[in-house]
Amino acid sequence: MTTYKGIKGFTVQTLTSDPSTPSAIGQVYYHSPSNTLKYVSEGGAPGGSWSSGGNLNTARTTGGLAGSITAGLYFGGNTPPSTQITEEYNGTAWSEVNNMTETARDQMYGWGTQTAAISAAGVTGSTGGKSKLAEEYDGTSWSAITENTTARQAGCSAGKVQTAGIIIGGKDSTGPGNSDNNMTEFWNGSAWSELNNLNTAGAYMAGGGSSTSALCGVGGNRPAQNESWNGTCWSEIAEQNTFRDQGGGAADSNTAGIIYGGEGPPVTAKTESWDGSSWSEVADMATARSMGSGGTGGQSGGPTSVLGVGGQIAPGARTNLTEEWTAPVLKVNTVSTS
């Protein structure tokens, strides 16, 4: 009789319960209670769902978002007008902390953790003036850092740590009526530098990831178009199923991410996941809304743990609602014996 050991050269471990830690990814085992052979793969967005979280103290849209589902940071935004308000999330409730120190603004780029975050660029709602102001947060207060190169708003951001992040695309003020931008800028903790451009300029985008592996797209004049970043250059990838701009986004890398919410019009609750080759529709948000794009991509949870914060549920109607997206880190698969 053919055995697994005879084919693969090693025996299969017998377990009475399924593994639950990431170190089990790739493991093959015999599950004795079900009398089946199983293996463990990465989980992610397809098995996820949205649930209600604590409300913001101040309803607003187009703020910057950093941190995680249990230690979040939401800063700036539009109430209207633009604001400097900063709130921290502990997994249950939001609390107001020290305001941003530079000019109040929204549609910023942001990334990092609750105790070490970056806010860059944006627009001042009262004047419509584009900004290249940048600030860093240390868990207690904000302080000014070197300005980024080009004043702009409503692009896409990616970064897991304060000292390594990128800002991508957006609206700048170089042309009549403001122009879509294709620029990528990198922050290394002390200075900004320009990297290779997007293939197609755009604004009101969503995305996320790290400074070396990211997703960006969706919005403005980029109907359903997306691009992947490998740390050196951008390449076009598959379109998502539902066009929207001003959505939220989060990613672990350029092969694992989600986009959620946005404006079609109308506002949508749809969520889609990216597995490196295609987009799939997954569980909808409870409340349809546009997230404001830009600063949402700086979350650390990727496609398994994401915050949807604030936003606009109808023209002029801001919300303070928070939703939490969670998806399994692991997926247990049954091996077919047919």
Image (tube, rainbow, N blue to C red):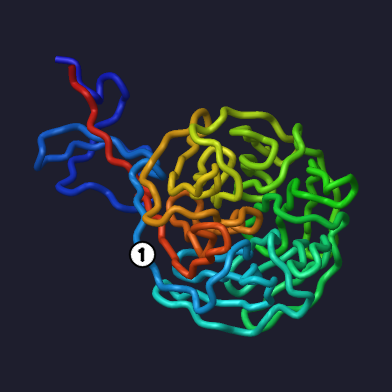
In the image: residue 138, left or right of residue 315: right
SS state under label 1: strand
> In the rendered image of this protein, does residue 323 appear above or below residue 55?
above
Q: Which of 26 and 325 is in front in this view?
A: 325
Asked if residue 25 can be seen in this view, the reply is: no
In the image: residue 37, left or right of residue 294: left
In the image: residue 170, left or right of residue 334: right
Residue 147 in the image: state x and y as whole percent.
85, 65
The quadrant of the image that shows the N terminus is: top left
Residue 182 in the image: state x and y as whole percent.
79, 41
The quadrant of the image that shows the C terminus is: top left
Residue 302 in the image: state x and y as whole percent.
51, 51
**Residue in the picture at 71% in, 56% down:** 165
In the image: residue 93, left or right of residue 16: right
Q: Nearer the viewer, residue 252 or 79?
A: 79
Q: Which of 188 and 319 is in front in this view?
A: 319
> In the rendered image of this protein, does residue 131 appear above or below residue 141?
above
**Residue in the picture at 86% in, 54% down:** 150
**Residue in the picture at 32% in, 23% down:** 8
How many marks overall?
Answer: 1
Identify the residue position indicated by label 1 in the image.
52
Residue 175 in the image: state x and y as whole percent.
89, 45
Label 1 environment density (alpha carbons within 10 Å; few <14, some 14–19, many ≥20): some
Image quadrant where residue 40 sits: top left
- The kind of residue on which mark 1 rests is Ser
> In the rendered image of this protein, does residue 146 appear above or below residue 58?
above
**Residue in the picture at 50% in, 45% down:** 258
